[in-house]
Amino acid sequence: MKATHTSALRLGLVSCGACHLLSRKPQALDHGITYCPRCGEELHQRKPNSIARTWALVIAAMVFYIPANVLPMTITSAVGTVSADTIMSGVIYFMQHGSWEIALVIFTASVFVPFLKFIILIYLLLAVQFKLVKQPKDLTRLYRFTEAIGRWSMLDIYVVTILVALVKLGFLANIEAGPAALYFALVVVTTMVAAESFDPRLIWDVVEEKHE
Amino acid sequence: MHRIACHECDLVHDIPPMPARATARCVRCNAVLFRAQANSIDRTLAWTFAGLVLYVVAVSFPFLAMKNGPIFNETGLLTGIQLLFEQGIIPLATLVFLTCVLIPLIQMLGLLYIFVPLKLNLRAQYAMPVFRLFKHVKPWSMMEIYMLGILVSIVKLGKMATIIPGLAVIAFGLLIFVLNFALSSVDSHMVWERLEGGS
């Protein structure tokens, strides 16, 4: 295998995001929409409005993150008493009842992973915007990491779904999904879309610009 | 020899024909450019058919049951989704339905739609848009996380009642692995070239 030491951008080529066909950059690419000659996917030299879009989604996710943590995730009613549980009160419940492994899993998936994603994405955005890229390989690795971990935040949504199904009428207790569940789902979806809209090639563009 | 740009750093590489099971990585950022697969079509089809059988079992048989004295409550994979829907939390019900029920099915049907004709040296109509859709839905297939959710729920309810895993949970657990084997048998580069050549 031979590498050319040049990016497709500099060679006037464009790589299809779906089928990876490398084709000559069409004249119309900068002005309008053009499609991959092989598979028909919309062609982009870089993901469109990558930085602005990622910022918008990260900020939206950070806003949703607040009600997701403050409002109740589940509302349990058992023999006349009603209790509302937030994500953290669930974590504390597991810690007090000796299941610290489960407490750790829920804390990591629901609280820590979204928070880590915010930090990493903001760090990547700032590094690209202010052209402060010293270790492009590490930044790319960081990007791959955020892309991989985001999905695991869905855990609590699934737990609520399963609990709702298992503990329903007929039992003495009943569990319903609380308002936080919806906000939490929004956090997961927006952070996943945010990671997808960030273009890691921008990191390498900064490096190439510096060498010119 | 063909030219490909790394999808993570845009560096252009010239890649010679590769032996089966070899992986080409970007020399600059180490991203996987592609993996050549041996018997991609046969292996993908075999795993996909196995996956569909497991899928049918996972959605139709009892999933989890909860027993507490005389009370016995049996649920299916779709029960929780249906209840969320009835409680009016429709976006949540939709999200769970998409990520754990519909998208895995789309992935398997998409693979069949593309690979059965390829096996017969044919090309399905709209095969390219279908394969593109298949690529786009991939991050939204989250069965393995649902499985972890089941474990957490069992621990959570363990003190209240006995949880009995049904046949469907076992099928669901196996499906996670089988679907992953099917996906990793797909040689995307070969598929695009075959789809292109057939036109």
Image (cartoon, rainbow, N blue to C red):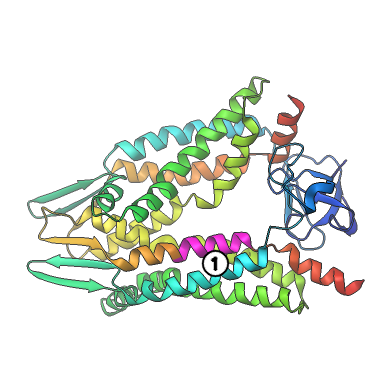
Coordinates of residue A188 in the picture (x, y in percent):
46, 63
Q: In this view, does A89 lie to the left or right of B148?
A: left
- Front position in the image: B137 or B61: B137
Residue at left 49%, top 30%?
B49
Residue A212 in view, yes or no = yes
Is residue B46 toward the left or the right of residue A158 in the image?
A: right
Label 1 resides on the chain identified as A
Residue B71, how many percent across, how many down? 10, 51
The residue lying at 71 percent from left, 77 percent from top is A127
Is B45 one of the magenta-colored residues? no
The vertical placement of B199 against A202, above or below, is above
**Residue sticking out furthest to the front:** A31
Q: Residue type at mark 1: give it.
A: Leu
**In the figure, residue B28 lies in which quadrant?**
bottom right
Q: In this view, does B144 lie to the left or right of A95?
A: right
Write down the residue under mark 1.
Answer: A57
Q: Which of B129 and B33 is in front in this view?
A: B129
Quarter of the image containing the N terminus of chain B? Answer: top right
The magenta span reads: A187-197
